Amino acid sequence: MINYPNDLDLRRLVRFSAEDGTIWLAEHRMVLLHTGALAGLRKELLNSVGLEHARRVLTRMGYESGVRDAELAKKLRAGQSVVDAFVVGPQLHMLEGIVKVTPLAIDMDVKAGRFYGEFQWDNSWEAESHVKEFGPQKDPVCWMLLGYASGYTTTFMGRFILFKETQCVACGDPHCHIVGKPVEEWPDAAQHTVYYEADSIVSRLLELRTQVDALRSSLDQQRQVENLIGSSPPFRRACDLVEKAAKTNVTVLLTGETGVGKERFARALHDMSKRADRPFVAVNCAALPHDLVESELFGVEKGAFTGAHATRAGKFERAEGGTLFLDEIGELPLAAQAKILRVLQEGEIERLGDDQTRKVNVRIVAATNVELQRAVKDGRFRADLYYRLNVYPIEIPPLRERALDIPPLVNAMIEKFNAMHGKRVAGITDKAMKALKAYQWPGNVRELENMIERGIILAPADGWIELEHLFPSLGEAEMRSIGIGEQGILTEARPLEQERLCDAIMGSGMSLDDIESMLLREAVERSDGNLAGAARMLGLTRPQLTYRLKRNQDHAPDKE
């Protein structure tokens, strides 16, 4: 029989946070469920889809849980022996209240791919619940537990390890007993691997649900705007305004904080309009030098100024028939504002250095992150141009007001950067996602995109993006400030410094009396023999210090 290493490192990973209704195992969110509720779900599955399909669903559910725990195990005890690292899984299974696991035999070599394991299970919630609902069984029934063992070991070993339950309490055996080895070493593997495959009934149900959702969506006329990801109410209101504007030629003013995605909204507006097959030209007005603004927007004739060696069309002419997106329009000089007003009113431009007017057919979409009304009052923006642009304003909500949209945005960004960097990550941990939802996002979607790209780069291949990958420059205290707290630890919550101190003391091998004597002597030495000062240093009264010094002296061993 194999002895487990101390599981204190695992217990410290489990935290309860009653204030926000969450439980954490490292960076993954957990839940506490009554076994009666799980038994009820199990019963409903068996009664509705039958034993074979219910077993498949439950096995796959356990397999996924094992995969998550194995990813944690490989990190947690990376510097220890392979067996000590592997038994994190059985220890976690016990800590999670699933079953008592006793390792009987483990023979493993990760590099060579060799594995053989035998384990005894006691107090299996699955066996107890099944017998309670359906009575004694002919065949083993710990399907979720078996799936967990296979998923955990497969992920740990890097090859498919199949476990079989050879004894089960539900069949009248005194214990549940499982054996695991590589799938190709089981002559009857095909009879068991079928339960790890996708369930055809579930797939058909999901397909049917997708069709129903699509029909319901069309009936409700809630078409998702292409390239715009989100379903939160403020985001949907902005998308609805874009859809309505796309059917017209109205000038649109997009407002919102920097990084909210104003250009993406402008492109979506263009793509949904009748101008979609014509050019979309974007101009960042804040990036244009003031002395070149007019030539860039309206074009220039040869010889109009020093350095104008050739006639050149401006942005308005290049966007002919399409859409011109003027980002940060509030940064334009007043002279350029007057000419843009003329384009809006007359639909014509003049190139710099030319006296000929040219008709243009361009839809203007402007954007700004400054308050134009205040700019008008300050004399920095023309009032007549403001009123002309403000015919159809659309305010893009900041990311902090659309927390519901963060998960789909993150998933889309992960897919994008996986392809861009030729690297695959499995996703983002629950704890990291919670931090993203709690963060205030001063840089909005642009900041989120930069953060996810950094996470992709820092996360291990095929691993998970964790909190430290998203906020690599933050310390633990700063991590807590963005919503990931220490509340609810199974033992009394304490600062990290105290935790390290306790580890050092426990690892020293000193007894409690030795530690007390050491502290008393150190306090007296640091106070230069002043007992009153030493007592204050230790938070004691002088009589209390005197008593402890005498007691330690009396108990000290005689030196010969």
Image (tube, helix red, strand yellow):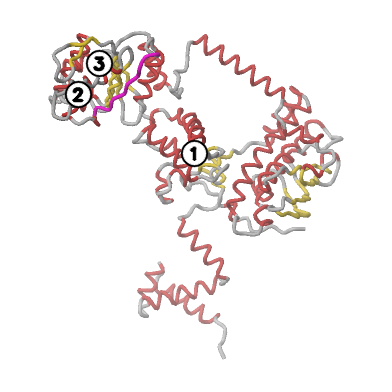
Amino acid type, label 1: His
Q: Provide the residue designation for mark 2.
A: 295
In the rendered structure, find residue 421 and report the number of the disc placed on it: 1
Quadrant containing the N terminus is bottom right
**In whole angstroms, how far apart are the C-alphas of marks 1 and 2?**
38 Å
Callouts 1 and 2 close, C-beta under 8 Å: no
Mark 3 touching mark 2, by CB under 8 A? no
Residue 549, numbered circle: none
Q: Nearer the viewer, mark 1 or mark 3?
A: 1
Magenta-drawn segment: 277-285
Can you give x and y, in whole percent of width and height, for residue 291 in the image? 16, 29
Q: CA distance from mark 1 to mark 3?
A: 41 Å
> In the image, 379: left or right of 218?
left
Task: Give yes or no for residue 387 being in the magenta stretch.
Answer: no
Query: At 64% from the left edge and 58% from the top edge, which residue is drawn?
Result: 6
Q: Which residue is mark 3?
A: 390
In screen coordinates, is 14 left or right of 176? Answer: left
Please state which of the two labelled residues, at mark 3 or mark 2, is closer to the viewer.
2
The one of 333 and 105 positioned closer to us in this rendering: 333
Q: Earlier in the sequence, mark 3 or mark 2?
A: 2
10 Å crowding of disc 3: few (<14), some (14-19), many (20+): some
Q: Secondary structure at mark 3?
A: loop
Q: Is residue 348 left or right of residue 437?
A: left
Q: Residue 129: x, y in percent?
A: 75, 36
Q: Is residue 279 magenta?
A: yes
Position of residue 518 measured from the top left corner of the image (x, y, whole percent): 48, 75
Q: Residue at x 75, y 27 (%)?
A: 53
Which amino acid type corresponds to the residue marked 2 in the rendered image? Ser
Q: Residue at x 53, y 49 (%)?
A: 489
Between marks 3 and 2, how big is the CA–CA gap?
Answer: 25 Å
> Mark 1 packing: few (<14 Cα in 10 Å), some, or many (20+)?
few
Q: Earlier in the sequence, mark 1 or mark 2?
A: 2
